[in-house]
Image (spheres, grey):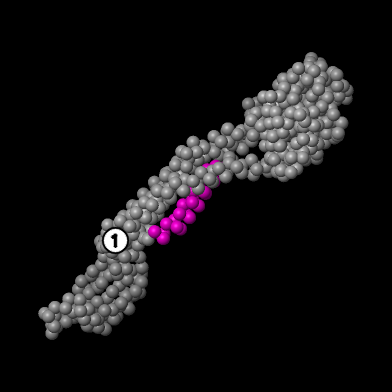
Amino acid sequence: MAVAAVLSLAGALLVGGAGALALLNINLWTRAAGGELEIWVFLDPKVPRSRAMQLRREISRWPKVRSVRLQTREQGFRELSGAIRHPALQGLENPLGDALIVKAVNPDAVLPLSSALRKLPERDEVIDAGDAVHWIMSVARVVRLGTFIAAGVLALVAAVVAANTVRLTLFARRKEIGIMQLVGATSGIVAGPFLLEGALLGILGAGVALAVLVPGYSYLVGHWPIASLGVPLAPTDVLAPLAGGMVFVGFALGLLSSGFSVRRFLRAPGGGEQPL
Amino acid sequence: MIEFRDVSVVYPNGAWGLRDVSVTIALGEFVFLVGPTGEGKTTFLRLIHRETVPTQGQVLVDGTDVGALRPRRVPMLRRKIGVVFQDFRLLPDRTASENIAFALYAVGRAKGEVRGRVPELLACVGLQDKADCFPSQLSCGEQQRVGIARALAGQPPILLADEPTGNLDPDTSWDIIQLLMAINSLSTTVVVATHDKMIVDRCQKRVIGLAEGRIIRDQAEGSYALSVS
């Protein structure tokens, strides 16, 4: 029964830990994607500089806008020439207009800001990583919800198994508990060993989960196929704090489950073996 | 020492445990509780030990209303009361000395103290040579002596015995009662619930008779009477 409790707790913690790692990486990708949440607004070349600067000031006051930077048409053409280096660009009249680089406060703000900027009459073209960010955010939502539900259900199952494991121990030792209560042992002395048992089950469960998660994630980091495309996984440094968190959650889950069982057992009429 | 004030106990199924019981047991007394099975003897003892609370009235032990005690205070009450059972209630996988030591460790006594106290208690009940015997290796009388030693482990001022001779032959029963009287002579208040007529008649101690949950008699040097007048 103790093995079942440890494995149940390990399952719940494994799902929770894997989900946390997935969400961590998704957050990293979200920040990397969309050029740090930037939206490029290329203005019509006929729009005067003064109007571009006025637009910069106005847009910077919009909600969900972190910052707005102005790239002049001259700067833009210089960067383009430097990037392309084609003789055809030498002596060519600058076809570009001024550009506003708008940075959103968070990924959720990119799409609505982009829609609003597309309505500007002065705009020539608006470019953002909206679709990519939107897709990543959708995935993040699904992963978050899925992790929450799966880990929550497994944690509940694990808590029940752990509680029943402790209940079995309580039942097996009911004579001893009865004698302890008879002679005046406090609830703390009676309950202590069983609470410790529950906490140990939780810690062992965390250990088993980490024994799977740590080498698994380390392997994944070392063999991630799209790291070279600029989509790396978070380094294995994140495993240390995650491990600490999982051990704590395992300990707390085991302790709470056993506490629940002990409390119910001791509150039963006579609490354990009936002395008289 | 022990006082019952208009105590009644009604169980959840409607059965009466005790009805309007008022009685006082002084410090150092030896009292027999007599009556047929189911007449309230065990309920009486359970009230003192706070295994049950009165539906009505008050039970006072050493001035404390035990019915009104908060759960976390109950262990302190129980440390003042030793209990002896008909079926001994020993832990079968522990020796005589370990059974006694268990009770001492349960109330937080230190190892050194326990090591010194256990042989004293075994000697007190005449089992100093049986320290390492398991209950299965002891006679019923010896097992009951271990039970008494365990009950005395915390030096309680009150000792309750619920049918302590119920599983014993007459000679052994008398030995046990003599042991309880010796304990009483050291100022421990002893209350014995029994329907052992021979013992009660021979001892000539205070007898409280119960019938249908009520006290029907209370005699200073009483004898056992099965019929209810």
Q: Position of residue A132 (x, y in %)?
A: 26, 61
| Res. B112 in view | yes
Q: Is B161 situated left or right of A160 in this image?
A: right
Judged from this view, the residue extending furthest toward the top is B227
Q: Which residues are magenta?
A: A236-260
Which chain's residue wears label 1?
Answer: A
Q: Which residue corresponds to the image point at 86% horizontal and 34% vertical from the top-left? A: B187
Q: From the top left corner, tell me how far across and down residue A80 is, in percent.
A: 20, 77
Q: What kind of residue is marked 1?
A: Ala
Name the residue: 35% across, 62% down: A28
State the predominant SS element of the stretch in magenta: helix
Snapshot quadrant of residue B33? top right
Residue B86 percent coordinates (x, y): 72, 24
Q: Residue at x 36, y 49 (%)?
A: A146
Q: Is residue A259 above or below residue A247?
A: above
For mark 1, does the 10 Å Cα neighbourhood hold few (<14), some (14 to 19), or many (20 or more) residues?
few
Along the viewing direction, whichever of B119 and A69 lies nearer the viewer = B119
Q: Is residue A79 above or below residue A30?
A: below
In front of the other: B186 or A213: A213
Measuring from the top left, give residue B22's x and y in whole percent.
Answer: 80, 30
Q: Looking at the image, which is closer to me, A45 or B188?
A: B188
Q: Which residue is mark 1?
A: A227
Residue visible at 55% across and 42% down in the picture = A197
- The picture quadrant where one finds residue A103 is bottom left
Kindly state the secondary structure of the residue where label 1 is placed.
Answer: helix
Quarter of the image where the C terminus of chain A is located: top right
Res A160 visible: no
Asked if the magenta segment contains residue A83, the reply would be: no
The residue at the far left in this view is A88
Is A254 colored magenta in this rendering?
Answer: yes
